[in-house]
Image (cartoon, helix red, strand yellow):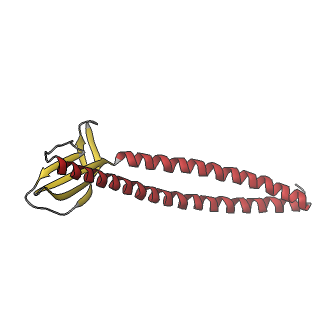
Amino acid sequence: MGDTLKKIRLIRKTSKTFLGISALLMLVSTVALYFYLRNLLQDEVEEELRSTEARIESSLVENPELFQLSPVVEIQKVSRLGREVLKDTIIYDPSQDEMEEFRELSTFSAINGKNYRITVRALVVESENILIAVVISYLVIILLVFLFLFFAFRVLNGNTYRITGLKE
């Protein structure tokens, strides 16, 4: 009876330790993944904005006619050049028929002797949805892995007692 009680106490202690460490690792890795992916997606959105802005500049060099694609692209002639601005903004999107959050890049360029303000925007909601989907998928997968390991270690602990001669 004493050996069985020792076995139960040891299994409980190792199980609590395993579950505690697993929960801590899962929490820390999920938070780290969230911030890493958020920064990665934000960098990708900014890279897309800069690429679009460069294409628009090239287009204005070849054809100085102004064009708009509201709310994604706006080009205006200005009297003087200003500073580049990168910000988040909420704008009505007629294609979605609602207010949407955009990442906005406004740059100023002198092209063919004329000054322009070029504003390009990218929808932020899509990247947030991707981020949430990835983090939730990660949580589900890592939770299943930890549960599998927990039960596998319980079986291994039982086998250890049989090998060492302790009775169940």
Is residue 166 at all visible to an observer of this figure? no
Q: Residue at x 25, y 55 (%)?
A: 105
Front-lying residue, 68 or 123? 68
- Kindly identify the residue that appears in the image at 21 percent across and 48 percent down: 59
- Identified at 44% across, 50% down, the residue is 131
**Res 2 quadrant in image:** bottom right
- Work out which residue is located at the far right of the displayed protein and give it: 165
Residue closer to the observer: 111 or 157: 111
Say if 72 sits above or below 3 in the image.
Answer: above
**In this rendering, would 63 be left or right of 168?**
left
Whole-percent x, y for residue 148 in the image = 69, 50
Please state the horizontal and vertical placement of residue 139, each as a whole percent of the image.
55, 50
Q: How many labels sit on residues?
A: 0
The answer, for residue 74, to whether it is visible in the render is: yes
* Residue 51 image offset from top left, x and y in percent: 31, 53
Q: Is residue 107 toward the left or the right of residue 37 in the image? A: left
Query: Outermost residue toward the left?
Result: 79
Q: Nearer the viewer, residue 80 or 155?
A: 80
Q: Is residue 27 left or right of residue 121?
A: right
The quadrant of the picture occupied by the C terminus is bottom right
Up the image or down, 93 lies above or below 114; here it is above
Q: What is the x, y in percent for residue 53?
A: 25, 52
Left or right for 17, reference 154: left
Q: Residue at x 17, y 58 (%)?
A: 109
